[in-house]
Image: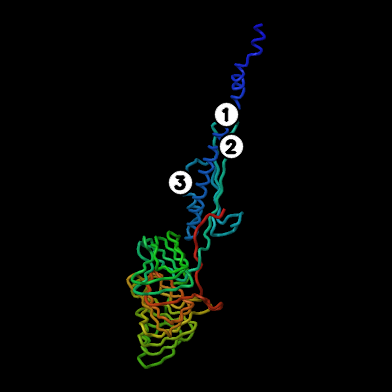
Amino acid sequence: MLRNRLRSCSRGNVLLVAAGSLPLVLGAAGISVDVMQWVVWKRQLQRQADSASMAGAFAVAQGKDGIASATSDLARTGEITLSATPVITTPPTSGSHANDPLAVSVTIETRRKLPFTGLFMRSSPTIDASSTAAAVSNGQYCVIALDKANVVGITMQGNATLRLGCGMASNTKSANAVSLGGSSSVQADPVAAVGGLLSSDRYLSPTTLLPYSIPQRDPFATLPTPAPSGCSGQVTVGPNSSRSLSAGCYRGMDVKGTLSLQPGVYYIDGGSFNVGSQAVLTGTGVTIILTSSTASASPSTIATVSINGGATIRLSAPTSGTYKGVIFYQDRRATDTGSNLINGNAGSFFQGALYFPSQPVEFTGTAGMSSDCLQFVAKRLSFSGNSAIVNSCPSNSGSGSFIGTRVRLVG
């Protein structure tokens, strides 16, 4: 009787089922915890790899040691202790950016014991992460301010209107690295800066702002340091006078009449390259180098340029050779105490680059001026007047815009 009652009683079934299921429930919970912990560690490790590859690529883009920068970043920002020496390569040996000299690849790994499954495993599993970052193109520029100080790099003055068929970039660190003063406006795509860029309705469409970008490289950094020799005296062309001049070295120029420059390189040894308001200056395939034979001892003696408003300037750069695409080149040993002024009237024509790496340049354009192929690279730049720089250069001119760079993850 008692046996039958016990046999038919079901009150303990739930307890038996629960007891039998407990190992499965605990196992599932343990595995869930392990999975979440694995994901957290994986994300932390991937973040370390991404940060290191970006640091390396930033360094490479600025001509520095990418491997050293990536290694330093891992030591500084590491959240997880690594179990093996990081593998850092530049250029990468595989992937979409294999053999890219502007790319840095980072692979790291760690061995971590998981809370639950680690109780049953002889050795801890390996977690790894890989990342590749590279400096890639972010547009084409024809205006670059090289100064890296906490100042404004590019200034628009008065009612200046600058329409560029290219971008402008400032390497300065100011909170507003490009200043639009007065009623000025600019159309450029993109506008990039190491510092900040304040939004304004005077950036005309389709302008794109790229604040806090990496510094743009000096496109003419490899030009040789000038070494003038055998210089003649100052060239003077008075009002109502005309003269044709051969390439060579001269101790200054003062042009108030008409001067025709024959093709070649012109060294200006100290003093000034001065062009008066009624002067006419022409030259095809010419580069004018502003320097000084005493530049090493007295950099303040390096020549400057002053082209006054009303002057008619028709200059084009050489299409080949060392100074291909460069109209003006000021010795980079110059001090930041000088200034350079370049104006032109409606009859003026420029084709090539104005390169003043150590001093500021003020450019005043005029409506109707032919500046379809004109590039500016200077320590700082200011614009006034109205200029439309299309930056559409003939294919055989040796001139053209400069490809900019930015750093991003690519793998």
Among the 4 quarters of the image, the one containing residue 8: top right
Residue 248 to residue 379: above or below: below
Crowd tier of the residue under label 3, counting other residues whose Cα lies within 10 Å: few below 14, some 14–19, many 20 or above: few
**Residue drawn at (64%, 7%), measured in percent from left and top?**
2
Answer left or right for 64 relative to 116: left
Give the colour scheme shown. rainbow
Residue 48 locus on image (x, y percent): 50, 46
The residue pinned by badge 3 equals 77
> Relative to 210, is 21 on the left or the right?
right
Q: Dot 2: few (<14), some (14–19), or many (≥20) neighbours within 10 Å?
A: some
- Residue highlighted by disc 1: 119
Is residue 77 in view?
Answer: yes
Answer with mark 2 or mark 3, whichever residue precedes in sequence: 3
**Amino acid type at image mark 2:** Pro
319 vs 410: above or below: below
Which tag, 1 or 2, sits closer to the chain's start? 1
Residue nearest the observer in this picture, 256 or 264: 256
Earlier-in-chain disc, 3 versus 1: 3
Residue 226 shows up from this direction: no
Residue placed under numbered mark 2 in the picture? 125
**What is the C-alpha distance between the residues marked 1 and 2?**
12 Å
